[in-house]
Image (spheres, rainbow, N blue to C red):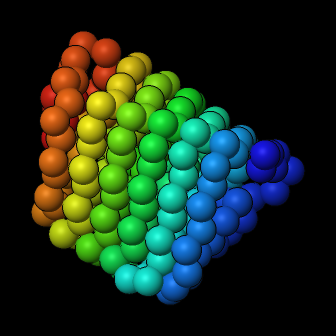
Amino acid sequence: TVNDTDSDVTGNGGATFLNSRGNVTFAACDFVHNSVLGGNGGAIAARGEEAQVLAYDSYFNENSARSGGSIFSARGAYVELWRNEFNGNVAKENGGVFYLADNAAMYWISNAAMNSESLNGGVGYAADNSKLNIENSTFLRNNASRYGGALYFSQSTAHTPFRLDPGHNRRTLCISVY
């Protein structure tokens, strides 16, 4: 369990930052109340083509960051998420749960994201040629004050064979997937 309510890291990755290279696996972990309000990835940040993160059967609760309330991935990093629950994560700018940029790739399989919020992409924000694969997942009661109550895509590739009920993910200016 990583539960840090007393500090605010100013860089990236409130609990873990994987820079440039390496592999890390989180199995049945709790990431609770981690914060990087001046940086990205409230719980986990990974960047670099040789950086790989795997998290499964874990719980991400009330993490916060500037972008990527729980997870930030950039510069070709690879993130794979299986059977995790994300609840109440917040980003001041983009991606209440995750933020992908600069050719990052993410596999999001059998996860549930609820009650998360940000300016754009209440659950996720994928930009700059990032690749996102979503399968068998639930998005419920997420909120974006501007675009994409659940997901926001900008110059990215998405494979999303899931059903999204726009009525359960709020947004101010656009449909739930933008």
Q: Residue 49: image x %, image y %?
A: 38, 83
Q: Residue 151: image x %, image y %?
A: 27, 40
Q: Nearer the viewer, residue 78 or 140?
A: 78
Indicate the quadrant where residue 41 lies: bottom right
Q: Residue 161: image x %, image y %?
A: 16, 36
* Residue ranking furthest to the right: 6
Residue at 77 percent across and 50 percent down: it is 2
Indicate the quadrant where residue 9 lies: bottom right
Q: Nearer the viewer, residue 170 or 76?
A: 76
* Residue ranking furthest to the top: 167
155 is higher (above) or lower (below) than 143: below
Q: Nearer the viewer, residue 55 or 97?
A: 55
32 is higher (above) or lower (below) than 47: above
143 is higher (above) or lower (below) than 56: above
Residue at 22 percent across and 69 percent down: it is 128
Q: Is residue 129 left or right of residue 15?
A: left
Residue at 59 percent across and 61 percent down: it is 25
User: Number of labelled discs?
Assistant: 0
Is residue 135 at least partly visible in the picture?
yes
Q: Residue 125: image x %, image y %?
A: 31, 51
Is residue 12 at least partly visible in the picture?
no
Residue at 86 percent across and 50 percent down: it is 6
Q: Is residue 2 left or right of residue 153?
A: right
The image quadrant where one finds the C terminus is top left
